[in-house]
Structures are given as C-alpha cells and as structure tokens.
Image (spheres, rainbow, N blue to C red):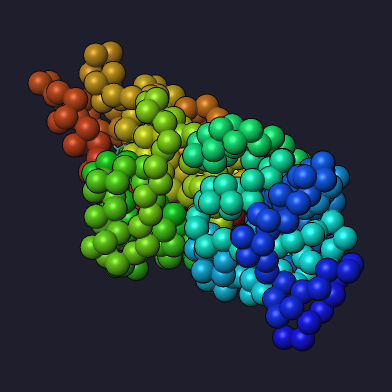
Amino acid sequence: MESVSYRGRIVSSTFISTLEETAAWRDELDAAGKRVVLTNGVFDLLHVGHVRYLNEARALGDALVVAINADESVRELKGEGRPLYTAEDRAEILCALAAVDRVVVFGEKRATNVIEAVNPHIYTKGGDYTAESLIDEERELMNRMGIEIQILSLVAGKSTSNTIKKMEGETEKSDKPRLALLGSGTGSNIRALVEAVDDGVLDAEIGLILSDAADSGVLEIAREYDLKGIHIEPGSKKRGHLTDAALKEVVDRLKANRIDLVILAGFMRVVRDPLLSEYPDRILNIHPSLLPKFPGLNAAKQAIEAGEAESGCTIHLVNAEIDGGRILAQASVPVLDGDDPDSLQARIQVREHDLYAKVIGDYWAGL
Ligand code: GRF
C-alpha cells in the first residue's frame, strides 16, 4: 500500500498501529498533559450509531484509540460471513473519521492485553454493557492501573447485524426455525429434540446446544450428534444466577448463530434482560408440573407433598417471572401410591419427550 496521510499523520503500509507504537505515543501525550481514550469493538460496516459513539468517546479526552477485533475473533463472535471487511479495511475506514486517532488490532477474546499495553486514561464501552458486565479480569486490571471506566449509551436500533438483515430482505420468518437448546444436566429432553429433528418429526435446524455446566450430558449430546456445543461459564456461584457478562455472552452466541427460538430444557439459570427483550415470545421452557401449580425447584416433590392425584408437564413461553409465562401446552400423568419424586419425575419425563417437539413445531407454524 502507498503511504497515505490523514490529518498530518503519515500512515505507511498500514492503518493499523502496533501496540508498542501506540504505547509510546500515549506516553508522549501523557507528558503533554493530554488524556487518551481507548475503546474496542468490531466496527464492521460503520453506521451512524458507531459514528456518534466514537465522537462521544473522543470527546471524553484528547485522543482516541480504537482496538478492533481481528478477523478470526469476529467470525467467532458474529458467525460465519463476518466480518464483512478485513481488519485492514476496517482500520482504514475508522482512521478516516475525525474522532479516531489510532487503530490497533487484538486477536484475543478479551481486551485485557490491549488495555494493559495502551494504558489509556479512560476506557469506554458502549451500549449493552454496564459497569457490571465488563469481564471481571478487565475491570480489576483497570482498577489496578487507575484507568477511568465510562459506559456510553448506544443509538437504539442501529447495528450492523440489523443493517445486514435489512439488506438481505430478511423480514419474513423462515420455514424451519433455527433452535438453540439450553440445558444444564442430563439432557434427556434435548436428546429427544435432537432425535425428533433427525427423524423428521420436528422440522427445524439445531443451530446450537449451550450449557452453563462444562460436564453436562447436554454437551455430550452435541458431541455425539456433531452439533455445535458451547459451554458458557456462569460467572457466579449464586444458584440460578448468570452474571451480566455471562448473559451477554449467551445473547452474543445466540445472535451469531442466527437463532430463531431459544429452547430451555433443564437450564438451571434465571433468564432475564437483555436476553428476554432480544427474543420476545421466542424463548420456551418445559417444566415438570401442571403450572401454575408448583413452579420452581423440585416440582415432583412438591406435587407429592401436596397430595396431588395428578401432575404432569407444562411448556410455556418465558418471561421475567420464574415458570410464569404464557402456557402453550400441558400433559398430565397420575401420581401413584408409593410414588417418590424420582418415580413421578420419570413418568412426567416420558410425556415431556413427546410433547416438546410437537409444541415447538406448532408454535413456529402459528407465528
Ligand atoms: C425436565 O424435567 C424439565 O421439565 C425440567 O428439567 C428437567 C430436565 O431434564 N425443566 P433433562 O435434562 O431434559 O433430562
């Protein structure tokens, strides 16, 4: 590439600065009493949301460094077909913006190394991040280095993914839903769903099997059937809880895999925003009781202790209330004399395995 100059800065052969150059430049600015802002992201196919965000970020200090994800990591984050533009091209486009002074590239999943090397005065993130959703490692590093963290708001509704969808005319729903199957344990329901798809009983594609437990049966099923299986560390020891960062990763993975319906089957973590608002009426759960009776844990035990003559399973949409969304279907089984929670649960599961595939197919067809 020829040498090109932007606002007096000669860029020879590349628009990507090395971390060493950037660190040295940062020190010069620091010595002159100037403040350097760092942000990071993909910045593939710029839209007005990016431009406003970068202008805001730049206005926090005197110079702005943008760290962009390397091509390979974008593919992992956003799915096949991304990035649309190579890191070189993205860097050149960014350098043409008045707000941007330097672009560096990072290949790791986390920005920790870049932050450490650049040592900015201010680090800023946009949009769906909150101070809590920064990866602990990043936050701890910045606290240690005395880097100020600023979260900026993003322009609603503007995103490269939305632009691509519009360009592809992707407004119609597809014939077959792409499913993400989420579970934490044995995965007998997930196995039944995978088999239903294999046998043609359920007309769907399985885009992803996701678990919060590395050793769950659910991920073994993914391996056995050669499906994409992902483990996401919940980031929290609190029962049923996912940290904001873990939840964000779940949402990112679902979007990257172009998921239409999120199917929970024994997923032992509470689903909340932003997942709920990203997939309104597109998250289903199966619960082993005749809801609204016995929501929550140990449903079979609760039914026996309440002296019920029958129990069963419920498939429902997921909302912010635990096991509280609109009921789509139920199937009942008798509670027999001498039942214990395990025997009742086993009887319920037989019904679950048939019902879930049918309800998913019918629900998609009715949308
Ligand atoms: C099922 O009984 C389901 O109703 C509940 O969790 C159990 C999961 O079992 N939400 P499995 O992992 O599908 O075998």
- The residue most toward the top is 306
Q: Which residue is drawn at 37% across and 49% down?
A: 231
Q: In which quarter of the image is ligand 1?
A: top left
- In this picture, residue 113 sits left or right of residue 219: right
Q: Give coordinates of residue 104: x percent, y percent.
A: 65, 62
Q: Is residue 136 visible to the viewer in this orientation of the structure?
A: yes
- The picture places residue 299, in percent across and down from the top left corner, at 31, 25
Residue positioned most to the left: 338
Nearest the eye: 362 or 295: 295
Looking at the image, residue 362 sits to the left or right of residue 156; the answer is left
42 and 365: which is toward the camera: 42
Q: Position of residue 32 (x, y in %)?
A: 82, 45
As drawn, 171 above or below 351: below
Nearest the camera: 32 or 319? 32
Residue at 23%, 63% in the rendered image? 224
Q: Residue at x 66, y 62 (%)?
A: 21
Whether residue 245 is visible, yes or no, is no
Image position, residue 63 (x, y; %): 81, 51
Report the side of 150 relative to 310 (left or right): right
For the residue pair 313 and 248, the one nearer the viewer reads as 248
Which quadrant of the figure contains the C terminus? Answer: bottom right
